Image: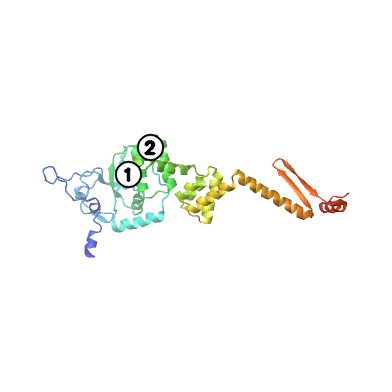
Amino acid sequence: MANQRKTLGRGLGAIIGAGVKKVSAGGTPAAHIPARSESVQTRAAGRNFVGGTIAASQVSSNGLFSEILLAKVVSSPYQARTEFDEGEIKSLADSISSEGLLQPVLVRRLKDGNYELLAGERRVRACRLLGLKKIIACVQDASDASAAAKGLIENIHRMNLNPVEEARGISNMMENFRLTQDEISKRLGRPRSSIANSLRLLKLPKEVQGYISSGLISAGHAKVILGFDDPSRQLLLARKIIESGLNVRGAEESLRRIRHSSSPSAARSAQEAVVSDIRKKISECLNAEVELKHSNKGGKIIVRYLGNDDLQRILDLIGVKI
């Protein structure tokens, strides 16, 4: 247990393997290069940072990792994630307070001296919740398109995005940077079919997209719902899935039943059944043989009677006086 405690709070060096000296071509350890920006300098040795001690030797020798001011970190305009669970942020803040920041955030340097956040929105929010002034970051140079792709990839791999957020992120990249599905596929390292299926979610009604975002229905359910082109039927099936607690297979069966009931032959059969039921009720009411002929444009009712007395009886029943 004592040995375990010694490993806690070691800070960035324990994570990124800092402290391992870079060996030059001649076999002599190379001197460490100071990190860029507000990086940890020699005078920072021994200073506590997010539950750990950061020394100059703990910043990677390639200068990518820097200690930067949280106040200079700005959110990316390409951030695909729109919903953040405050409970999760609080839990992450407690973890950082106890064990330190286990992974630096990813940023790119802006011309105005600020840093645009590419990956690590939850970590930044948690550190701000703790009232921290600085954070360890991996500073990279990236174009706008690359920045958007890095942020989206980070969120996808961490499963921080719901399927609709992911689809919107892909759509925004295509629109903002005029990228094709093939180009998006290469940047994200995903099959083109996966990109196409993701984008199809944005064709669903907003209400159905909301069900997906909140986890009431899955992406698998959504694929079944997209079997309908009619938004009203898409919404109807989505509600049925939720109300009946259908799994994907159950949703597929429900789709087949709805399709069958809406086919022309099924519609004709349903209409014939209704006409037959009406004819039967008229016949029972008049106690006479009735023929009902119906079409969408009109029809006729034929009542058969047996002699004058039977006709008078029927007239009395329908309120006709002679």
**What amino acid type is highlighted by mark number 1?**
Lys
Relative depth, front residue between 264 and 22: 264
Position above or below: 141 against 99: above
Furthest-bottom residue in this view = 1
**Secondary structure type for disc 1:** helix
Residue 216 is at least partly visible in this image: no
Relative depth, front residue between 189 and 86: 189
Q: Is residue 28 left or right of residue 214?
A: left
Q: Are marks 2 and 1 in contact (CB under 8 Å)?
A: no
Which comes sooner in the sequence, label 2 or label 1? 1
Q: Quadrant of the N terminus?
A: bottom left
The residue shown at (53%, 56%) is 244
Q: x and y percent of residue 99 in the render?
A: 29, 57
Furthest-right residue in this view = 322
Position above or below: 155 against 173: below
Q: x and y percent of residue 155 in the render?
A: 36, 47
Residue hosting label 1: 72
Position above or below: 143 against 257: above
Q: x and y percent of residue 171 in the render?
A: 42, 40
The residue shown at (38%, 37%) is 182
**What amino acid type is highlighted by mark number 2?**
Asp
Residue hosting label 2: 182
Q: Is residue 297 left or right of residue 20?
A: right
**Secondary structure type for disc 2:** helix
Q: x and y percent of residue 123 in the render?
A: 34, 51
Front disc: 2 or 1: 2
Residue 117: quadrant of the picture: top left
Label 1 crowd bin: few (<14), some (14–19), many (20+), radius 10 Å: some
Relative depth, front residue between 131 and 237: 237
